[in-house]
Image: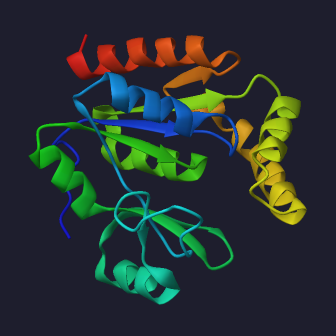
Amino acid sequence: MKFDPSAGKCIIFSAPSGAGKTTIVQHLLGKIPELAFSISACSREPRGEEEHGKHYYFLGIEGFRQKIDEGAFIEWEEVYADNFYGTLVSELERIWSEGKTVIFDVDVIGGLNLKKIIGKNALAIFVQPPSFGALEERLRTRSTETEEKISMRLAKAQIELDRAPDFDYILLNDELQRACKEAETVVRTFISGQ
């Protein structure tokens, strides 16, 4: 598929798991009508209340690999063994055709890959937790994952935190309301082109 990265603007939110990026993205979607959420594709099964086409496009491992072969992704990554996530070209084209700015909630490597591909039409924001200890506490408070999964996420978080300087903007999430307000200001400025 031919992808035109100059067809619209993108806001990329990335962070280690538990840093609060999803909460901030949801806040922005409620406050800035020019934004539309890019639904990622993944190979895993839905969890809990998750719905296909709303939270993710749940493709399964074979379906995901088929889309890779078709060249349907802007970027994709095998985050853990047989656990794929990616961004479909069709998703950006859908949002841009509606005249909106795409907002992403993606992992750190996916965010950097998107920034590299989309270039100046993308603003890449890294959500920084107040400390590694706070991040670990947030992951444990969720009570959604096994100890093994938490350990995997924490090991990955150490590496991801080192990549923060590679982003256009580092947003410290030490106090959620303040971080949301700051994110609003930064995103509105980028969309308006000031």
Q: Which residue is drawn at 57% across and 51% down?
A: 109
Check the picture and name the quadrant holding the N terminus. Answer: bottom left
Is residue 25 shown above or below 95?
above
Residue 59, quarter of the rendered image: bottom left
Is residue 185 shown above or below 146?
above
Residue 59: in sight, yes or no?
yes
49 lies left or right of 82: left
Q: Which residue is drawn at 11% across and 38% down?
A: 99
Q: Which residue is drawn at 20% across and 48% down?
A: 95
**Residue 186 image offset from top left, x and y in percent:** 41, 16
Q: Nearer the viewer, residue 155 or 55?
A: 55
135 lies left or right of 24: right
Number of dots carrying numbers: 0
**Residue 161 image offset from top left, x and y in percent:** 73, 37
Q: Which of 62 and 114 is in front in this view?
A: 62
Residue 115, quarter of the rendered image: top left
Check the picture and name the quadrant holding the C terminus. Answer: top left
59 lies left or right of 140: left
**Residue 41 image offset from top left, x and y in percent:** 42, 66
**Residue 51 image offset from top left, x and y in percent:** 43, 65
Is residue 6 shown above or below 128?
below
* Colour approach in the figure: rainbow
Is residue 171 shown above or below 21?
above
Q: Residue at x 41, y 48 (%)?
A: 114
Residue 4: in sight, yes or no?
no
